Image: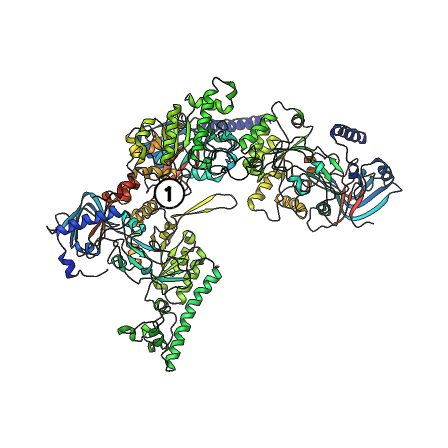
């Protein structure tokens, strides 16, 4: 009896030991399985590629990228036990101006200038539009309010996928910049002074000069608030940060006249960090653009040249020309309804206009990341950054190439192995 | 025009000096008008000889010549080969250089653009002809030239039951005769409902059209048998004189149904509203059958079979029609893919999108297909081919779908779609590989005439190089 | 047991009483039996009604075969199996060989107030508004609800109000207001952010509510401590998400009304200990909606259905059953659990001693849509249907 039980015990101990051994093996670092909840998606991988475009200036031939728990940990030449192989890897694309908005509830329209209102509560992360962006290679995007206000508030940088569709899971950074708009949209829904006045939309501005007036008033009041407490307000506090260069201001201006207005106001208030979004007609004011020191996010390059914003036109050589002149810019797809104009195809269009490959790659990765102040986390393939990668079937951005896979925060949102 | 020989007057204009002046005149017209296309008939025929040099010649999607030369004479390719191996006439004008890649002009197998109001209100308008609505100076043709599309099958719009006669054109010329390559070519039919109709009434309209044809033919035959000459008198009343072939009768040659005794009627006496349909039923004219949804394909194929023109039918398909690919394969017809390359379906419940690469389906099933720029945001077949390559076609398959296959569908495979001796001199000089992103169409030669030079294209300068349109309104130059 | 219940109900009344506005005189003299005034109560006191039912649903899934229900003075005095319940000698006995269930309860309803009561457009913050004052017991639609077996329903302020006021639980017959302060109604629905007045954005909407519940005063504190219920209007999933984040931030608990596809957020609803009131399902919800219902039922999230078209009310419960909810959960969603969510679960929604004598005589199992209503009693009085 005792002998039997001790034999059983020995057997059990042996079994236990081997179980432990197996357990130990899978707990080694760099392992493929994810411990923790069974249903949590895998976030550690090693991917090999013919070419890895890191967007730091370095291109790795026949190399690998290793990702652990959602972060990039290593990259270099060689195979290093890859989980799968692709033709090319670029960083996940960064969209500096998403056109996806929840609607009018993203803007507090009781006043034209609400720079203090954050978009954190104005997002619908359940929307499948983010997934469409993700499938198109965009892993990080700036979610914007509608441009119904002159100064609309504080947008949020979010991931388009990965984890749960919650702000906790997907937010990269909130309150990254202040959003404003020139042109037609901020004044469009307001009614001119005629007949009976009713409703809060019966107010300034109904013209471009009204828009400019609101903008200047908000900034002058913010300046005045430094010394006169009666002008103090949450909005003024935010604009003071803009004036001090702590927070960038991003305004939408596409047509020439709106670009002029924007840059003139930048100069008037000596705003240190200034981004023009939806930029179109920049070459018509080339010297002003170069001298301004502003950064630019282009409207999508389209085949007929129309930006769709206030009739602005964007010639295809604009990015190349600005690159020559040393102007900081990013390309944008604006989540355009036409897939041919989305972010992944914009570098191709820009290259047709003369932009170099390396600059085109930067313009959709590290340049927008820097503009949005999130370059510590995204925008290039470097150790320590988020594991946001796009896998290509050939040379990235070529019309003959296709996105075969997308990884966001280490999760394989689009699996390149599935399409074989 | 196809097969036309140059007249003696035109031959007299041949010469280098005239060539240069004519080219300059072309540039002048290009820049001044900003929208007009320059070359006149005289110019088009004046280039008796042209030598095209290129670092790389793509003869067809599977054949290339490195460092080659093409000699074009009388509008057709006289010789093609490696430089040094081909005899080059010393007096001919030369265009090109080693930095270029020569490519056959693209062929658009179906288009309903470039016309003033392409859709006619009445259901059956077979007596109409696009000749009367094509606008040669329309921006569409200029764009075709810019993107290297040198042969275009223009058909009436698909918002009809049966439309009018189409025509194959080239995007060079300012009158309809100048641009015509093949007149009176093709009829368009639509299985998708015309605006205001349901599928049932569309099918009814289609049946009615052919039934009316049959009834009409039987009536005039019966009338002739009774000793009357109603048809002839009607024709005279309509102002149509019956001469030559028109005065002869001919038995009906339909493969699906026939009306006996048609030889009693002079062909020219047949009502002009019915004559094109008769030609269709007799298989004498191609049919371009438009389908917007998979179930339209059933109606199209059935109509074509029942009326004996299946063999001459090409289906013009919208996005979702790939679902009927098996049916199409069985029928053995070719298709023009006018929808987007990727068909996106959104699940109404989950909101998830499913994408289907449409040309890939037909490639796999073995159905002959062409790509089209009809509904694209750009009038560019090479862009369609490049994107298709990314999405799953091989390079050869994609290039074939914009050159050889459409040429074959239009019955022009002996004339366009590839660069071979005897073919028309429709040659593109591209700045790089035809499918590369940064490649531009730098020069276009149509039937031996050098009709497009990108460095002198004002619209290109405005759009791509940011030039101010105001600069192009100057009167000097 | 009885003394505890009595104490509890007395305590409840005591809590509620100071804030109850005295009912206007005419409210007590409407058609139907008088319920409130004490002299008629004494009359009612003497009449005893006993129902003998082939199946007696007590609530929470407990169904008694050959059950007996004894009612006096508008309340249940005893309910149980035939052998265990004594029928007083002077009782009027009703024999029913079908099912008897508590009267149905709607935790939220739309269209049971006069139309103008949804008209408040200009003032988004009305915490002290009492919807009970807008209740009209003579509204014809209440008869339709009664005819569908609903005896108690919650009327609420408009969804366009950020803080709309206090909901009320009312009877569909007799005009009794069970509670005129059931919940504080909040709206995180886009309708509250889109009016032509402040706030027009979710940011301001949430910001205001955040501020009101930070060191809350008055009714906001009552809602925070649970003395008054909290009812939040939402619709799209992102609105439910927004509401849950607000609740978690401010330590609030309550009911969310109107959630779409709640099952897809079930873990978070469970964690927040929130209950949900769902739109009517209709006869054929799609696959995704069914899956959502099934997940919700499997999770530990109390749910109820709202009442709009009375003919659809029971359908929702049947669909929930079809989706996988237990019989208790499915019928409870329009009865006892709905009463709990409506914060009147100690006086209606069950047939237990001390509860209001609101019950329905069915020809068959009430969850079976082919069963017909044969009689409805409210407050012990026959309100609808055949009498014996």
Q: On the image, which quarter does residue A255 sit in?
A: top left
Q: On the image, which quarter does residue C202 sit in?
A: top right
Instruction: Tell me which chain the residue with mark 1 is part of.
Output: A
Q: Badge 1 local density, few (<14 within 10 Å), some, or many (20+)?
A: many
Give percent across and percent down for residue A198: 56, 37
Give percent across and percent down for residue B362: 37, 53
Give percent across and percent down for residue A71: 42, 28
Q: Given the current orientation, which residue lies at the most extreme right position?
A: C89
Q: Residue at (39%, 82%) from the top-left corner?
A: B226
From this view, report whether residue A382 is shown above or below residue C233.
above
Q: Is residue A239 left or right of residue B18?
A: right
Q: Nearer the viewer, residue A175 or B312?
A: A175
Q: Which residue is mark 1?
A: A340
Q: Secondary structure at mark 1?
A: helix
Please say whether residue A39 is visible from this viewpoint: no
Q: Given the current orientation, which residue lies at the most extreme top position?
A: A227
Give percent across and percent down for residue C300: 63, 35
Q: Nearer the viewer, residue A276 or C251?
A: A276
Q: Nearer the viewer, residue C157 or B340?
A: C157
- Quadrant where the N terminus of chain A is found in the figure: top right
Q: Given the current orientation, which residue lies at the most extreme bottom position?
A: B227
Total numbered badges shown on the rendered structure: 1
- Quadrant where the C terminus of chain A is found in the figure: top left
Q: Nearer the viewer, residue C380 or A19?
A: C380
Please say whether residue B55 is visible from this viewpoint: yes
Q: Is residue B454 left or right of residue B200?
A: left
From this view, report whether residue B189 is shown above or below residue C130.
below
Q: Given the current orientation, which residue lies at the most extreme front position?
A: A195
Q: Is residue B96 left or right of residue C70?
A: left
């Amino acid at each position: 009896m005792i002998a039997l039980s001790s034999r059983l015990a020995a057997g059990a101990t042996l079994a236990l030991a081997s179980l432990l051994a197996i357990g130990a093996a899978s707990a080694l670092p760099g392992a493929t399985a994810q411990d923790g909840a069974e249903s949590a998606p895998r976030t550690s991988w090693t991917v090999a590629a013919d070419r890895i475009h890191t967007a730091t200036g370095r291109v790795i031939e026949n190399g690998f990228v290793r990702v652990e728990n959602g972060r990039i940990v290593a990259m270099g030449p060689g195979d290093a036990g890859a989980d799968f192989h692709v033709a090319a890897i670029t960083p996940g694309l960064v969209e500096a101006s998403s056109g996806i908005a929840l609607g009018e509830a993203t803007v507090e329209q009781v006043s034209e200038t609400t720079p203090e209102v954050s978009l954190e509560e104005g997002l619908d992360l359940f929307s499948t539009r983010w997934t469409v962006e993700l499938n198109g290679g965009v892993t990080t995007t700036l979610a914007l309010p509608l441009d119904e206000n002159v100064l609309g508030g504080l947008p949020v940088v979010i991931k388009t996928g990965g984890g749960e569709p919650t702000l906790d899971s997907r937010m990269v950074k909130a309150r990254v910049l202040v959003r404003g708009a020139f042109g037609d949209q901020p004044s469009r829904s307001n009614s001119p002074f005629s007949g009976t006045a009713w409703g809060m939309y019966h107010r300034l501005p109904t013209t471009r000069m009204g828009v400019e007036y609101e903008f200047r008033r908000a900034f002058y009041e913010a300046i005045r608030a430094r010394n006169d407490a009666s002008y103090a307000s949450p909005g003024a506090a935010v604009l003071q940060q803009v004036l001090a260069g702590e927070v960038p201001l991003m305004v939408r201006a596409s047509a020439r006249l709106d670009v002029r207005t924007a840059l003139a106001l930048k100069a008037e208030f000596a705003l240190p960090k200034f981004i023009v979004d939806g930029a179109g007609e920049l070459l018509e004011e080339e010297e002003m653009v170069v001298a301004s020191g502003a950064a630019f996010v282009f409207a999508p390059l389209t085949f007929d040249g129309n930006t769709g914003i206030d009739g602005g036109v964007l010639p295809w050589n604009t990015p190349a020309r600005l690159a020559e002149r040393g102007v900081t810019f990013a390309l944008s797809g604006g989540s355009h309804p036409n897939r041919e104009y989305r972010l992944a195809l914009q570098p191709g269009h820009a290259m047709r206009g003369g932009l170099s490959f390396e600059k085109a790659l930067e313009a959709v990765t590290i340049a927008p990341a820097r503009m949005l102040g999130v370059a510590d986390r995204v925008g290039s393939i470097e150790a320590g950054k988020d594991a946001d990668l796009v896998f290509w079937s050939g040379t990235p951005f070529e019309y003959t190439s296709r996105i075969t896979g997308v990884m966001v925060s280490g999760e394989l949102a689009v699996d390149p192995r599935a399409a074989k | 025009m196809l097969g036309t020989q140059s007249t003696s007057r035109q031959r007299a204009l041949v010469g280098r000096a005239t060539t240069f002046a004519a080219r300059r005149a072309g540039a002048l017209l290009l820049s001044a008008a900003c929208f007009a296309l320059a070359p006149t008939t005289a110019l088009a025929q004046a280039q008796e000889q042209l030598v095209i040099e290129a670092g790389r010649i793509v003869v067809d999607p599977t054949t290339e010549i490195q460092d080659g030369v093409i000699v074009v004479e009388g509008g057709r390719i006289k010789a093609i080969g490696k430089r040094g191996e081909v005899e080059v006439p010393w007096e001919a004008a030369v265009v090109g250089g080693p930095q270029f890649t020569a490519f056959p002009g693209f062929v658009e197998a179906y288009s309903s653009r470039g016309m003033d109001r392409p859709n006619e209100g009445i259901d059956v308008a077979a007596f109409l002809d696009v000749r009367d609505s094509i606008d040669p100076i329309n921006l569409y043709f200029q764009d075709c030239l810019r993107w290297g599309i040198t042969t275009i099958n223009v058909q009436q719009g698909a918002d009809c039951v049966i439309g009018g006669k189409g025509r194959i054109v080239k995007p060079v010329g300012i009158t309809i005769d100048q641009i015509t390559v093949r007149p009176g070519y093709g009829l368009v039919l639509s299985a998708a409902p015309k605006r205001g109709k349901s599928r049932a009434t569309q099918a009814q309209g289609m049946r009615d059209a052919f039934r009316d044809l049959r009834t009409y033919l039987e009536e005039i035959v019966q009338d002739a048998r009774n000793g009357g000459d109603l048809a002839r008198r009607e024709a005279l009343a309509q102002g149509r004189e019956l001469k030559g072939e028109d005065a002869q009768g001919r038995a009906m040659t339909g493969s699906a149904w026939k009306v006996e005794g048609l030889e009693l009627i002079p062909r020219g006496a047949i009502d002009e509203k019915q004559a094109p349909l008769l030609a269709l039923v007799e298989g004498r004219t191609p049919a371009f059958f438009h389908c917007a949804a998979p179930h339209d394909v059933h109606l199209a194929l059935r109509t074509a079979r029942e009326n004996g023109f299946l063999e001459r039918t090409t289906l013009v398909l919208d996005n979702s029609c790939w679902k009927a690919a098996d049916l199409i394969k069985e029928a053995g017809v070719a298709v023009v893919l006018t929808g987007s390359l990727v068909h996106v379906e959104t699940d109404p419940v989950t909101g998830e999108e499913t994408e289907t690469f449409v040309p890939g389906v037909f490639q796999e099933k073995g159905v002959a297909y062409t790509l089209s720029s009809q509904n694209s945001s750009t009038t560019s077949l090479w862009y369609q081919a490049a994107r298709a390559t990314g999405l799953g076609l091989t390079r050869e398959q994609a290039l074939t779908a914009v050159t050889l296959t459409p040429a074959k569908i239009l019955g022009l495979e002996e004339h366009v779609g590839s660069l071979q001796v005897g073919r028309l001199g429709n040659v593109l000089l591209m700045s790089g590989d035809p499918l590369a992103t940064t490649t531009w169409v730098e020069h276009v030669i149509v039937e031996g005439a050098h009709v497009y030079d990108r460095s002198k294209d004002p619209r290109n300068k405005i759009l791509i190089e940011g030039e101010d349109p105001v600069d192009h309104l100057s009167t000097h130059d | 047991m009885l003394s505890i219940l009595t104490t509890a109900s007395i305590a409840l009344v005591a809590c509620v009483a100071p804030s109850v506005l005295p009912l206007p005189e005419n409210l007590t003299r409407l058609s139907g039996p008088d319920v409130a005034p004490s002299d008629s109560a004494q009359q009612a006191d003497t009449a005893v009604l006993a129902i003998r039912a082939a199946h007696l649903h007590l609530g929470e899934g407990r169904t008694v075969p050959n059950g007996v229900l004894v009612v006096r003075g508008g309340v249940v005095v005893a309910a149980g199996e035939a052998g265990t319940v004594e029928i007083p000698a002077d009782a009027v006995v009703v024999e029913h060989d079908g099912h008897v269930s508590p009267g149905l309860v709607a935790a939220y309803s739309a269209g049971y107030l006069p139309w103008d009561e949804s008209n408040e457009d200009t003032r988004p913050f009305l915490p002290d508004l009492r919807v009970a004052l807008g209740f009209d017991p003579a509204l014809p639609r209440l008869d339709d609800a009664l005819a569908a077996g609903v005896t108690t329903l919650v009327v609420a302020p408009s969804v366009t109000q950020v803080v709309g006021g206090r909901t009320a639980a009312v009877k569909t017959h007799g005009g009794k207001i069970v509670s005129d302060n059931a919940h504080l109604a909040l709206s995180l629905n886009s309708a509250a952010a889109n009016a032509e007045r402040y706030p027009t954005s979710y940011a301001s909407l949430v910001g205001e509510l955040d501020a009101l519940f930070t060191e809350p005063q008055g009714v906001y504190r009552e809602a925070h401590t649970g003395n008054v219920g909290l009812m939040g209007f939402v619709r799209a999933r992102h609105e439910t998400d927004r509401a849950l984040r607000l609740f978690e931030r401010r330590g609030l608990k309550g009911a969310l009304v109107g959630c779409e596809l709640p099952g897809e957020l079930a873990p978070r609803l469970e964690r927040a200990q929130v209950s949900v009131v769902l739109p009517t399902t209709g006869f054929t919800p799609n696959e995704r909606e069914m899956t959502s219902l099934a997940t919700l039922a499997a999770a530990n999230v109390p749910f109820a259905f709202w009442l709009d078209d009375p003919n659809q009310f029971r359908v929702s419960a049947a669909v929930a059953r079809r989706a996988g909810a237990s019989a208790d959960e499915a019928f409870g969603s329009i009865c006892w659990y709905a009463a709990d969510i409506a914060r009147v679960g100690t006086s209606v929604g069950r047939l237990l001693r001390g509860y209001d004598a609101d019950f329905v005589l069915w020809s068959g199992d009430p969850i079976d849509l082919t069963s017909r209503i044969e009689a409805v009693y409210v407050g012990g009085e026959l309100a609808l249907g055949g009498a014996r």
